[in-house]
Amino acid sequence: MKQLLSVIFFVVTAVSAFSQSSTGRSIPNDWFLRDPEQDSLQGVSAERAYQTLKDQPSRTVIVAVIDSGVDIDHEDLKSVIWKNEDEIPDNGIDDDKNGYIDDVFGWNFIGGKNGNVDADTYELTREYIRLKKKYENVESNKVGKKQKAEYESYQEIKDKYEKLKAKNEQQYKLYSNIYNNISQSIDTLKSLLQVDTIKAEDLKNFETKDPSLLFAKGFLLNMFKNIGDDGNLEEYVAELKEGVDYYEVIVKYGYNESFDSRQIVGDDVNNLNEKGYGNNDVKGPDPEHGTHVSGIIAADRKNDLGIKGIADNVKIMVVRAVPNGDERDKDIANAIFYAVDNGAQIINMSFGKSFSPQKEVVDKAVRYAEQKGVLLIHAAGNDGEDIDVEKNYPSRTYADGKEAKNWIEVGASAWGGDEDFVGSFSNYGKKGVSLFAPGVDIYSTVPESKYKNQSGTSMASPSTAGVAALLMSYFPELSAEQVKDILMKSSRKFDNLTVQKPGGGRTNFNQLSASGGLVNAYEAVKMAQGIKNQKPINK
């Protein structure tokens, strides 16, 4: 789940009504809904699109969010959560006979009778474990011709695993030491200064000859250099703690050969055709990511609370399949099948990884969605890489080389059309990425009826899914392929805009995706209206 987890570098907790741009300009929290002509912000132009849809009827569209779980009781989401009306809650019976008992609001494929998976290993770790059993004690000159390719793959995976494990252990130690030093310094000086909040001015006026106190004073003054004299140390420490927690999970679970999450699920990991496992807890232990994604798509636009989602007539079907680690191919395949079979017209997938050992089962599910006319929207990833070169799964390319026609791959953009327009973390690809969408400092829902900013292609994907849902809602005659085609063709173009290329260097923005553009609800609606007025659209 490379792009699901929000790393400390990509996460800024929203503490005021506005974000600050690099130029000091105040950016409104709903910037991703705005329009460049009306608001001078490179949003999806949703509000402008609704101006052209006034009095036009719409139908409810179901969007499945395959993710970490969703807080279905959130004040801004509870009215837009899909409910399986054919299922009687909590009676222990599969009333609708779809293979899942009491799936009232969706299903959780990473849970079991006695709880839920929170953290999991990375696919790299699982591949390393699998191949290590076969080749750990085998000398290269004794490997048969048929096994040579796999043996060489094992050597590459082993090298990558060991390097990444060591690197992340080092990062965890670094962040932990910084966090502990700051926390101890703050607690000590708060007590001495008898204040609730430490300010830069207090530190500058504090005199001492005690070496340990001088260290604490100097340490915190250096922190203020980073955040400004008016900055809040407590907020800085809270963000730093997110980094500590992030690396702790990586070290304890992601690269831990001994950890096995599937004991909780209780399924047969080798049976790729197994269905019906899991439980109906769609919230799970950490639904922050899925809740944030859902708010971007569908936060209630009529309740005068929090934020407005992009789509105004939509229901979110919750499918939990992504842990704090790498998702499993079997779970993702079953999640797609579940969503399609239960009426989803769009599936948002804000997750990804570098290996897909059971890709054939995911391909089968993607083909099924394609046959059923369901649009799949996937986050391109947060590694700053060219996915025309680097592997990123799941992908629209099947094992036989053919491509799914119902698939949109999304990169992340910011609010201003300047050289920093592309998210510095965003993956890109002239072939692999379809288009870009807002994914930097997106203010949306998080658990317990709260809100915060998050950044990532995980946010860009639902920005696109929301626009797709808007189109399908107001133009029900459009097929998934037609919606994709409209979104690609109507995307906002930027003539000769040179941007900072993720990973380094500079390039023309139109070279970073197949469409060369930014998703544009206003132009997409105009195009759909034009098509509708010309002739009937065949489904």
Image (spheres, helix red, strand yellow):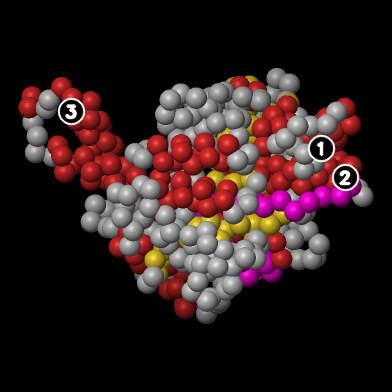
The structure residue drawn at horizontal position 43% and vertical position 73%, both measured from the top left corner, is 188
Mark 3 surroundings: few (<14), some (14-19) or many (≥20) residues within 10 A: few
Q: Main secondary structure of the magenta part?
A: loop
Q: Which labelled disc corresponds to residue 525?
A: 1
Which numbered disc flags the more N-terminal residue, 3 or 1? Answer: 3
Mark 2 surroundings: few (<14), some (14-19) or many (≥20) residues within 10 A: some
The amino acid marked with disc number 3 is Gln
* Residue annotated with mark 3: 147
From mark 2 to mark 1, how far is it between C-alphas?
8 Å
Labels 2 & 1 near each other (Cβ < 8 A): yes
User: Quick check: can you spot residue 231?
Assistant: no
Q: Is residue 329 above or below residue 275?
A: above
Quarter residue 41 falls in: top right
Return the x and y of residue 211 as percentages of the image width and height.
35, 65
Q: How many marks?
A: 3
The structure residue drawn at horizontal position 55% and vertical position 68%, both measured from the top left corner, is 95
Q: Which labelled disc corresponds to residue 53?
A: 2
Return the x and y of residue 376 as percentages of the image width and height.
59, 40
Q: Secondary structure at mark 3?
A: helix
Q: Is residue 343 above or below residue 70?
A: above
Return the x and y of residue 92 as percentages of the image width and height.
49, 74
Quarter of the figure with the C terminus: top right
